[in-house]
């Protein structure tokens, strides 16, 4: 009943996205990883991370999981978001952004537009962190890669975004997202995608709180002609563009910042 009441209060804006902080194995949302195997990620010393199963409530008050995120409560940005790509449809966008109260010890189990506890923002970014920052809220799981209204809404969470250079976000990275759609539409079946962020440890934090992104990366894997085929992407390069790499090449490049094995169970 409380979910219904909250939905009615927000009906004049948008359906709200929810998420759930889960155990380290993403036990409630492993279906968003290739072969149900999350990336092997080793956080740098002193960096804390929390796995989140991103979900929404449907009209029957049932949780529907949409994708998975590994979130750094130290950097206050996601390390990566993982999702399954099946098709892309032209979906209208709703830019109401949400936070995850659970990350800050709020008893509310679902994501909301804001939290009511005194500690909200301790372990995560909030909307005020982006005000007059000069950065976009750069999606990891982008609206362009969603297939319905509910999955579109679920992407608009600050646990699925990092401060991203506006020009790169709106030009080169946007063109890349469109090119990925074209590539993945040739897969035999669903494609598995992991999109991540490399933090810029030298740049000033937003309001001395939120680490900005230095690079964005993406890895895809799917069956093409019955063979697993993977591609890696990394940007911006020195020309402000997105590089295409092999998965191994992407992991090698990321090794200069942190250790991650993106598709640990199946070579792509």
Image (cartoon, rainbow, N blue to C red):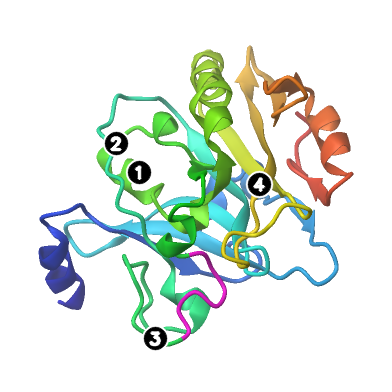
Magenta stretch prevailing secondary structure: loop
Above or below: residue 256 compared with residue 106: above
Residue 192 x %, y %: 58, 35
Residue 144 in sight from this viewpoint: yes
Q: Could you say which disc has been placed on residue 148 in the image?
A: 2
Query: Which quadrant of the rendered structure holds the C terminus?
Result: top right
Disc 4 is placed on an element classified as: strand
Highlighted range, magenta: 119-125
Determine crowd level at label 3: few under 14, some 14-19, many 20+ residues with C-alpha closer than 10 A.
Answer: few
Residue 187 x %, y %: 55, 18
Q: Are marks 1 and 2 in contact (CB under 8 Å)?
A: yes
Decide which of tag 3 and tag 1 comes sooner along the chain. 3
Q: Is residue 259 left or right of residue 75?
A: right
Disc 2 is placed on an element classified as: loop
Q: CA distance from mark 3 to mark 1?
A: 28 Å
Q: Nearer the viewer, residue 203 or 13?
A: 203
Q: CA distance from mark 2 to mark 3?
A: 32 Å
Decide which of tag 2 and tag 3 comes sooner along the chain. 3
Above or below: residue 168 compared with residue 138: above
> Which residue shows up at 51% across the image and 29% down it?
190
Determine crowd level at label 1: few under 14, some 14-19, many 20+ residues with C-alpha closer than 10 A.
Answer: many
Of the two numbered discs 1 and 4 in the rendering, the one whose residue sits closer to the viewer: 4
> Which residue shows up at 78% across the image and 53% down it?
202
Determine crowd level at label 2: few under 14, some 14-19, many 20+ residues with C-alpha closer than 10 A.
Answer: some
Q: Which residue is mark 4?
A: 213
Q: Which residue is mark 1?
A: 151
Q: Is residue 26 left or right of residue 185?
A: right
Q: CA distance from mark 4 to mark 3?
A: 28 Å
Decide which of tag 4 and tag 3 comes sooner along the chain. 3
Of the two numbered discs 2 and 4 in the rendering, the one whose residue sits closer to the viewer: 4
Decide which of tag 2 and tag 4 comes sooner along the chain. 2
């Amino acid at each position: 009943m409380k979910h219904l009441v909250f939905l009615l209060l927000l009906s004049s804006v948008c359906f709200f996205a929810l998420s759930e902080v889960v155990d380290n194995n993403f036990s409630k949302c492993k279906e968003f990883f290739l072969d149900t195997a999350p990336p092997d990620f080793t956080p740098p010393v002193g960096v804390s991370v929390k796995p989140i199963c991103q979900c929404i409530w449907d009209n029957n008050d049932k949780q529907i999981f949409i994708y998975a995120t590994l979130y750094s409560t130290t950097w206050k940005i996601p390390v990566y978001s993982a999702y399954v790509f099946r098709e892309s449809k032209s979906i209208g966008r709703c830019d109401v952004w949400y936070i995850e109260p659970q990350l800050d010890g709020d008893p509310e189990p679902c994501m909301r537009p804001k939290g009511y506890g005194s500690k909200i923002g301790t372990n995560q970014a909030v909307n005020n962190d982006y005000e007059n920052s000069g950065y976009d809220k750069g999606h990891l799981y982008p609206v362009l890669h969603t297939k319905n209204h509910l999955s579109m809404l679920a992407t608009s969470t600050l646990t699925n975004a990092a401060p991203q250079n506006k020009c790169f976000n709106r030009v080169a990275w946007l063109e890349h997202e469109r090119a990925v759609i074209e590539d993945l539409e040739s897969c035999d079946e669903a494609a598995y995608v992991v999109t991540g962020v490399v933090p810029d440890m030298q740049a000033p934090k937003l309001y001395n709180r939120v680490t900005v992104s230095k690079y964005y990366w993406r890895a895809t894997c799917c069956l093409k002609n019955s063979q697993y085929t993977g591609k890696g992407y990394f940007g911006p390069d020195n020309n402000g563009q997105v590089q295409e790499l092999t998965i191994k090449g992407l992991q090698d490049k990321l090794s200069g910042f942190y250790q991650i094995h993106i598709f640990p169970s199946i070579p792509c």
